[in-house]
Amino acid sequence: MLAQRDDPIIAIATAPGRGAVGVVRISGKDLHSFAQSLCGMVLQPRHAHLLTLKDDQGQAIDQVLAIYFPGPHSYTGEDVLELQGHGGTVVMHMIMARSLALASQSSKNEPCHLPHLRQAMPGEFTQRAYLNQKMDLAQAESIADLIDANTEAAARSAGRSLQGAFSTQVNALAGDLVHLRMQIEACLDFPEEDIDFIETLGVVKQLHTLLSKTAQLKEQAHQGQLLRDGLKLVIAGQPNAGKSSLLNALAGAELAIVTPIAGTTRDVLGQSIQIEGVPIHVLDTAGLRALADADEVEQIGIERAWAQIKQADMVLLLNDMSRADEPPYVKEQSSLEQLVVHAMPARTKLLQVNNKCDVLDHQVQMDTQAVAISARTGQGLQQLRERILHLAGWQSGAQEGVFTARARHLDALARVHQRLLNAQDLLSNKVPALDLMAEECRLAHQALSSLSGEFSADDLLGEIFSSFCIGK
């Protein structure tokens, strides 16, 4: 994508299908003459012009609004022409075809100077905005997050990132790190006074402050990633533990069939919900028991249940409290817990849930760490929601300042934090190894700069922008 970044590009910027309005967007250098030839009139910058767009035979294609944005004061930083017509698929493609045909003619006859106009690749408009310094990489990524947001809280957090909330903190941290590097380099220039310089310049205090700020930014970024990516929550347990009833209760709808017959659920059934704005992807799975005790179809369901557990962010392991005084059941539940813990990835959280507490007619010794609920009556569901968010690391009431973040952001911040810890360890030596400290701080700065895109490989940029929709 980077090798072709000087080509003018065109794309339909609205979603596929029918709609009241459709937009064709063109970006490139020196579009003014081309825009005049295409529209049949001189376009004033940033003014909407109502006109009839015609084909090469002079036949009307559509009545459109044409808006011309001269660079650098445009979305991409280049000249941009937007044509807003009626939102039919055929009409949009006719406008694109006319633009491409005119550009092809102009490249031969040179009346409007627009050779090599081509269809844009996914995310190429936003990539050009980033390359032309209209926004940094974190802001560019937040545009895709804003489009993909499936809760209001996620949309608001992406909007904050787009406005620069995340980038501002990253840049402030980078500024502090640059200052620390300068201090260490000054120490290196006077090696015989290393220790005195370190004390005078306050290197220890600066490093401690940087570590504290990085940890805080990591925690904020984690909140943002939860809002962006959500949580994959798998409900697991023995047959008839109430898994399908819990899915229905959390979703507020009768999604899964509930019967007293063991093995009713044969496949994975999912539903996306939200708790305090955090997207939760809830999966109901087949009851877990020995494959030999199940028929062929149920065996497939059980295998799929284990596959989902291995990919979960959190597992709710249900315990049927109506059978809590049956030794065989209790023994099977204990064995099942061990199997689930063994199958889960290290990052996955396990939450014990005691279901059917409403049917108990006597006191039963219960795990104090488990959440007691009744999926049938709704008892304990609010506490369960709160425990899910707490275990996931969500801080309730923190939405106002949350910005969107991605896994790569958390990874970069983790690398920054580790490099600064390494520098702190070196500083704690009786004779500080300042040259090694300087290198650790340099690597920390490099990892931090990858967030804004100051140091980003082309293959990373390609991976990021290829996930965007065409026309954005």
Image: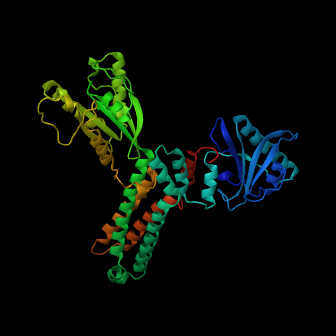
Question: Residue 361 in the image: x percent, y percent?
Answer: 13, 29
State the residue at coordinates (30%, 35%). 343
Asked where in the image residue 368 lies, by quadrant, the reply is top left
Q: Looking at the picture, how far across and down is residue 204, in whole percent?
A: 33, 74
180 up-or-down from 270: above or below:
below
User: Is the residue 449 above or below the residue 127 in the image?
Assistant: below
Residue drawn at (30%, 31%) of the image = 236
* Residue 179, picture quadrant: bottom left
In the image, 368 versus 7, the foreground residue is 368
Q: Name the quadrant containing residue 429.
A: bottom left
Residue at the top extreme of this rendering: 295
Can residue 456 be seen in this snapshot? no
Q: Nearer the viewer, residue 33 or 363?
A: 363
Classify 191 as above or below 56: below
Q: Nearer the viewer, residue 317 or 191?
A: 317
Residue 240 in sight from this viewpoint: yes
Image coordinates of residue 85 in percent, x first then y, are 72, 43
Seen in the image, is 105 located left or right of residue 409?
right
